[in-house]
């Protein structure tokens, strides 16, 4: 049975490859999470969870994650992926993901607005909003990713 996560790490990366799938793998490597298996989940920041740096983990680890992924095989295409979290220390928060054919900075602006709207419609006030993003200009096949990884312990993996 799954437990409520105690921590969340936000990471982003980009990559180029011979295929879109290889570019996705390179983007995950750039983000530091290529050796994790994720289960895609929806976007609620668990009550009491804190945002932490990416901790060490064993290869093959299975983790819940919210993620944004955009790949393209059109040379010259600019792609971006962003993730944002609205942290409410006394309650739960929200996590939003966004992809677009735009810059990293523009993607972060949009995802921040998405987080703020998600909080507002729930009647929540954020103590802080944290975003991260990546962008990439495609040569052959490229990918941009941004992820929120849910950890079972406050420092990552329970020992």
Image: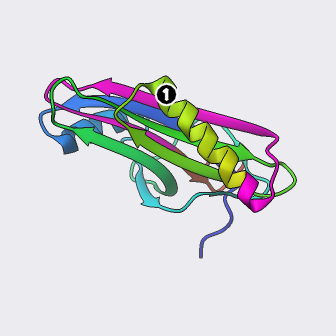
Q: Tell me the SS state at disc 1.
A: helix
50 left or right of 125? Answer: left
Residue 75 in percent (x, y) is at 15, 26
Q: Position of residue 102 (x, y in %)?
A: 38, 29
Q: Residue at x 87, y 53 (%)?
A: 90
Q: Which residues are magenta?
A: 120-147
The residue positioned 56% from the left and 40% from the top of the image is: 111
Q: Main secondary structure of the magenta part?
A: strand
What percent of the width, then of the height, locates residue 109? 57, 31
State how the image is colored.
Answer: rainbow
Question: Split into 4 quadrants, where in the image is the N terminus?
Answer: bottom right
Tag 1 residue: 106
Q: Report if residue 123 is visible in the image.
A: yes
What residue lies at 44% left-to-right and 61% top-to-bottom? 39
Q: Alpha-carbon neighbours of circle 1 within 10 Å: few (<14), some, or many (≥20)?
A: some
For the point 46% across and 49% down, the residue is 67
């Amino acid at each position: 049975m799954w437990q409520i996560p105690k921590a969340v790490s936000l990471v982003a990366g980009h990559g180029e490859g011979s295929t879109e799938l290889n570019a996705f793998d390179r983007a995950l490597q750039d983000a530091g999470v290529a050796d994790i298996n994720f289960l895609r989940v929806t976007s609620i920041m668990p009550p009491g969870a804190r945002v932490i740096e990416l901790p060490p983990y064993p290869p093959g680890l299975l983790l819940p994650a919210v993620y944004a992924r955009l790949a393209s095989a059109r040379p010259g295409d600019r792609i971006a992926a962003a993730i944002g979290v609205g942290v409410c220390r006394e309650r739960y928060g929200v996590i939003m993901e966004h992809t677009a054919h735009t810059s990293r900075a523009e993607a972060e602006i949009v995802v921040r607005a998405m987080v703020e709207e998600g909080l507002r419609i729930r009647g929540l006030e954020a103590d802080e909003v944290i975003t991260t993003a990546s962008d990439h200009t495609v040569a052959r096949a490229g990918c941009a990713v941004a992820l929120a990884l849910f950890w079972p312990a406050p420092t990552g993996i329970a020992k």
